[in-house]
Amino acid sequence: MLQMRLIWFYILLWMFGSWKTQNMTKFLRDANSSKVINISNYWTGYTDFQIQSHRDLINILTDIYDYHQYINLWEDREQLFAQKSHLYPAYLRKAAEFREKYPNLPRNIWFNVALDEWSIYFNPRNFDKNFKGENEKLLNFIYQPRKLELLFMVAVQNPLELDVKFRRLAGYYRKYYRGLHFIRWHKDLWFSNPEEMDFDKAEVIGWGINFNFYPWFPRYLYNTKELIQATEDIYVPRSLYLSLADMLHPFRPMKVGELRQGAALAATA
């Protein structure tokens, strides 16, 4: 888990099929703990929050940003703003309001954002739609996720379907192969030229073998036939904080009904 944290932008590849998504889901399952929130744009048994639209992604990342600013950085507030004295009073006011409204949030929670079919969400031909106007905030989060203790994992069929910004920022790529029956393997790759993405010139920096008896073992708990589309909003802003407060108690996976109930409560908060 610690090794994965060092690489904040992680891209899974395969031409067609659900191998890449199965393995991304397996990571969410293995990361399911009292210190992690799993966020994905497809439903799994290990999803704490499901998002569906660009606005959902911005809203939940904004909540993560506020949590980081006013909870994680609170103890370092004097050192953090020593060189920004003109901003310090405004920070104290906002932090006090936030901490009064959400008094029971634990510190140092990790966040996994797993997005399948990334090229549908961020088609490189739609740069204006993806990153300008109301979506401009996304660039701030995508460039600085390490500071938010945030790991992005994205799955695409081909790296050239990605906007070049993501190709430049990716820590590395993992390519999954069809394999033989239940034996499947992958290679971890690094590209010296993200504009070119020539697999013949890629540096292989690791490889591995997966024994996959899906759907019997391991149990990934997701539907490979679910359509991934960036459509209507489903994430309720600030509902994340209810789950964070619940982490103060012994961890237990939240059920779909509880997530909906929590979202309804957050909407009235």
Image (cartoon, grey):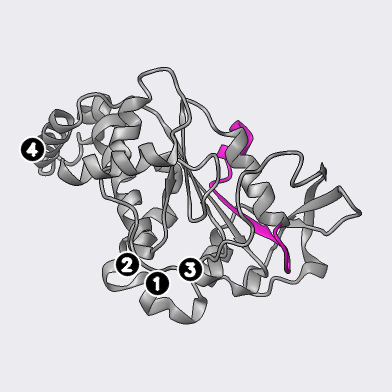
- CA separation in Å, label 1 and label 3: 14 Å
Which of the two marks, 4 or 1, is nearer to us in this view? 1
Residue 59 painted magenta: no
Q: Dot 3 lies on which element? A: loop
Determine crowd level at label 3: few under 14, some 14-19, many 20+ residues with C-alpha closer than 10 A. Answer: some
Q: Quadrant of the rendered structure where residue 105 is?
A: top left
Residue at x 31% of width, y 61% of height: 137
In this rendering, the answer to whether 106 lies above or below 260 is: above
Q: Amino acid at mark 4?
A: Pro
Q: Which mark is residue 130?
A: 1
Question: Furthest-top residue in view?
Answer: 250
Q: Dot 1 lies on which element? A: helix
- CA separation in Å, label 3 and label 2: 17 Å
Determine crowd level at label 4: few under 14, some 14-19, many 20+ residues with C-alpha closer than 10 A. Answer: few
- Residue that mark 2 sits on: 135
Q: Amino acid at mark 1?
A: Asn
Between residues 242 and 136, which one lies in front from this camera angle? 242
Q: Quadrant of the rendered structure where residue 143 is?
A: bottom left
In this rendering, the answer to whether 112 lies above or below 174 is: above
Question: Furthest-bottom residue in view?
Answer: 125
Q: Position of residue 140 (x, y in %)?
A: 36, 57
Q: Dot 2 lies on which element? A: helix
- Residue that mark 3 sits on: 229
Question: Which residues lie in the magenta part?
Answer: 1-18
Q: Determine contact: label 2, label 1, CB under 8 Å.
A: yes
Q: Position of residue 238 (x, y in %)?
A: 25, 44
Residue at x 63% of width, y 48% of height: 24
Q: Determine contact: label 1, label 3, CB under 8 Å.
A: no
- The first of marks 2 and 1 along the sequence is 1
